[in-house]
Every structure is written in structure tokens, then in C-alpha cells.
Image: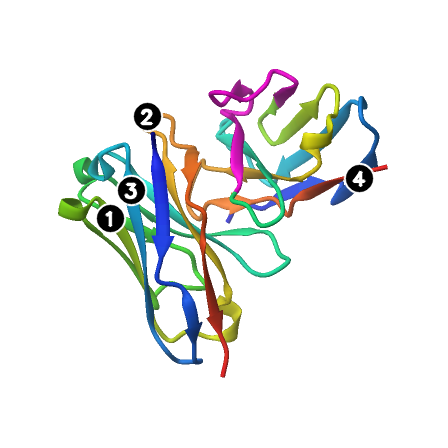
Amino acid sequence: EVQLVESGGGLVQPGGSLRLSCAASGFTLSDHHMDWVRQAPGKGLEWVGHSRNKANNYTTEYAAPVKGRITISRDDSKNSLYLQMSSLNTEDTAVYYCARVRGGIYYIDYWGQGTLVTVSS
Amino acid sequence: DIQMTQSPSSLSASVGDRVTITCRANQGINNYLAWFQQKPGKAPKPLIYGASSLHSGVPSKFSGSGSGTDFTLTISSLQPEDFATYYCQQYNGFPLTFGGGTKVEIK
């Protein structure tokens, strides 16, 4: 069974940093492209970033509002995906979801349960 | 960037109603269009990909159609478990973009 479990969210002060983790099980992470998507309280879904699979050298794409402030990385030995965030501001307050992209068809076919990041002083 | 516009933003419907939600892209997206259902406090769930293909395990009361820039999600007979917010998303190119959502409420 495919599972994605995010962790690492919490309260952080403006200007601070945070690293979110996404533990994958039931499939080999390195075979799949992955996305991070966030949702501010009471708002819609917003794509944050994309990590291509090993065959595509783990290259990445980032949304304009977070580019330069986030880095997506992986640890194949742990079958885990990470989202490193820095220079956080109140507009980054959201539930952050990691999501698997279905191979060959490229839509999101599995979502984690999400982890809440709150940026506040 | 590709803008995705959903309409309506909310609707009220009764159990058994046929419901249609529209999603329009501001440029062609080669049918790389997905639909998701989200209930309060939960992660989104995939319903449709490729504009009209049903994700595994999704009941056939859900259907997607459209091409080019105009797409629709139809629920043939609304059931209590279908009251939720629905999002379209294009995955034709980066940045990936979502529609603003359509909240389906009980009349």
C-alpha cells in the first residue's frame, strides 16, 4: 500500500527555517517524480515544487513565491523526500502536502496527510 | 503561467442531483487536466486524470470531459459523501496550477 507521511511542521518565527520530511512506503521513491503542494488556512491548493525521479537526475522546479527560499531533496536510503524552507514569512503559513506523481501519466495519484507550518512571532 | 478558472466557486445541490463544475484554462493544456476532491481537514483525493480518465477506485458517477481549454467534472447523482470541495489542476507545464475550487454544499 502506498503511503506518504509528512512530518516536521510546527511554529516558526518570521525569518526562520524549517525542514519538512515525507516518508514514503509501498513504492520506490527514486522511481517517481514528487510534488509539494500547500494550502493556507481556508484557502485553495498551491503547488510549491517538483522533484523529478532518479532517471531524470532529481532535477527540480519551484514556484515563484518560494523560489530561492526552498530546496527539495531526497534520501534514497530512507525512501524520503524533504522540503527545506528558509526566510519564512507569514504567507508561508499552510498545510504542506507531499504528493506522488504517477509514472508515465504525470498526475498526482497519492497525497500525504499534510503537516502544518505556522509562521508567527 | 497557465491560469485555471473554476466555476461556480460554490453551489448548493440536493441528494440525487446531477452536478457539473467547469474549469477553464487560459491556454491549451493538451488535456493534462486532473480533478481532486477534498473534504475538510483531509488531503485531496484524485478523481480524474487526462481530462476524462477515472482514477483507480473512483466510482463511475464521476466523469470528466472537455478538451483544449474547457473542461467539466460531472457527478451524475450526488450522494451525501460527495459534499466536498473540488479542484481542477493542469499538469501540462510548470508552474503547475490549480483552479480556485468549487464547494459543493447541501441544499
Q: Amino acid at mark 2?
A: Gly
Q: How many marks?
A: 4
Helix, strand or loop at label 4? It is: strand
Q: Provide the chain ID for the residue under circle 3.
A: A
Q: Which residue is mark 2?
A: A104
Residue at 73% from the left image edge and 26% from the top image edge: B79
Do badges 1 and 4 share one subunit? no
Q: Nearer the viewer, mark 2 or mark 4?
A: 4
Q: Are marks 1 and 2 on the same chain?
A: yes
Q: Which residue is mark 1?
A: A80
Give the alpha-carbon distance from disc 1 to disc 4, as whole Å: 39 Å
Chain part drawn in magenta: B44-65
- Distance from disc 1 to disc 2, alpha carbons, whole Å, reads 21 Å
Q: Is residue A32 visible?
A: yes
Q: Residues within 10 Å of mark 2 (few under 14, many from 20)?
A: few
Q: Residue at the location (24% across, 48% down)?
A: A80
